Image: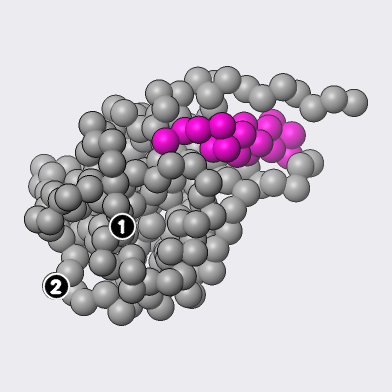
């Protein structure tokens, strides 16, 4: 019996858990070494309440100002590692697991009691050639991530594709910060195959690859 052919990227679900997993304790240990002063408050203040900050690991080539390093610029074509990534060997190894071209890569921290308001990032759709992948570093059960009004349950160390051109919002009602490794990347043949594999697993739950939840 033949497997179903890969679905076109335009038909992907809005969330997919990918068949990649990383060690959250090792990631968290490196994040803990980052000085509090190195985090940059998110520059779009209208999008959130409370504390939401960024630590850039890859940025637009040549950027030196903290805010410009923290921006994910969809028009940029050349990216480079930041000094923070040089100090984080395990996070470098995590990024090495992604065989597609990497654009901006950031650690994004949402403080306890903070909220990211509903919004959409219109270019972040795999069908348009650019995807944003989330790898939770720290998580708590009181973080409520909503995509298209439905909750996305993500555990530390997992890797998720989220179609963030759709409306999404996050509330951290817990007592600890939520930190995600956020990887913006170009959708090449490798990533397209990974996404279609994950989508196939959602349609066929007997597959060994777990699918999205929500």
Indicate whether residue 34 is drawn in magenta: no
Measure how far apart labels 2 and 1 are at the Cα level.
Answer: 19 Å
Q: Which sits in the foreground, 177 or 191? A: 191
Q: Please report the residue visible at 58 percent of the width from the left and 20 percent of the height from the top.
A: 8
Q: Position of residue 155 (x, y in %)?
A: 51, 59
Percent x, y of residue 99 = 53, 46
In the image, which disc is placed on residue 7? Answer: none
Circle number at residue 81 = 1
4 on left or right of 92: right
On screen, residue 131 above or below 51: above
Per the rendered image, the range of residues in magenta is: 186-205
Whether residue 110 is visible here, answered yes or no, is no
Q: Quadrant of the N terminus?
A: top right
As helix, strand or loop, the secondary structure at mark 2 comes to: helix
| Residue 21 pos. (x, y %) | 58, 58
What residue is pinned by disc 2?
Answer: 37
* Relative side of 135 to 166, left or right: right
Q: Residues within 10 Å of mark 1 (few under 14, many from 20)?
A: some
**Residue 11 image offset from top left, x and y in percent:** 54, 21
Question: Magenta residues: mostly which secondary structure?
Answer: helix
Q: Residue 138 versus residue 95: which sits nearer the camera?
A: 95
Q: Is residue 179 visible?
A: yes
Residue 194 belongs to the span the image colors magenta: yes
Dot 1 falls on a residue whose secondary structure is strand
Q: Residue at left 26%, top 66%?
A: 83
Q: Residues within 10 Å of mark 2 (few under 14, many from 20)?
A: few
Label 2 close to label 1 by CB (< 8 Å): no
Is residue 87 shown above or below 185? below
Which of these two is toward me, 174 or 133?
A: 133
In the figure, residue 128 lies in which quadrant? top left
């Amino acid at each position: 019996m033949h497997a179903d052919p890969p679905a076109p990227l335009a038909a992907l679900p809005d969330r997919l858990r990918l068949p990649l997993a990383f060690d959250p304790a090792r990631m968290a240990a490196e994040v803990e070494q980052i000085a509090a002063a190195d985090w940059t408050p998110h520059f779009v203040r209208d999008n959130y309440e409370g504390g939401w900050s960024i630590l850039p690991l890859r940025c637009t080539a040549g950027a030196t100002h903290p805010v410009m390093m923290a921006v994910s610029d969809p028009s940029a074509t050349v990216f480079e590692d930041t000094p923070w990534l040089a100090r984080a060997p395990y996070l470098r190894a995590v990024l090495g697991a992604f065989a597609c071209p990497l654009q901006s890569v950031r650690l994004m921290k949402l403080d306890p009691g903070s909220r990211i308001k509903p919004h959409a990032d219109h270019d972040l759709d795999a069908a348009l050639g650019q995807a944003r992948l989330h790898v939770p570093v720290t998580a708590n059960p009181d973080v409520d991530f909503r995509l298209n009004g439905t909750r996305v349950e993500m555990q530390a160390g997992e890797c998720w594709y989220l179609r963030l051109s759709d409306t999404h919002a996050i509330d951290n009602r817990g007592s600890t910060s939520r930190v995600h490794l956020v990887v913006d990347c170009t959708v090449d043949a490798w990533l397209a195959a990974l996404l279609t594999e994950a989508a196939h697993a959602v349609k066929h739950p007997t597959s060994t690859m777990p699918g999205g939840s929500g």
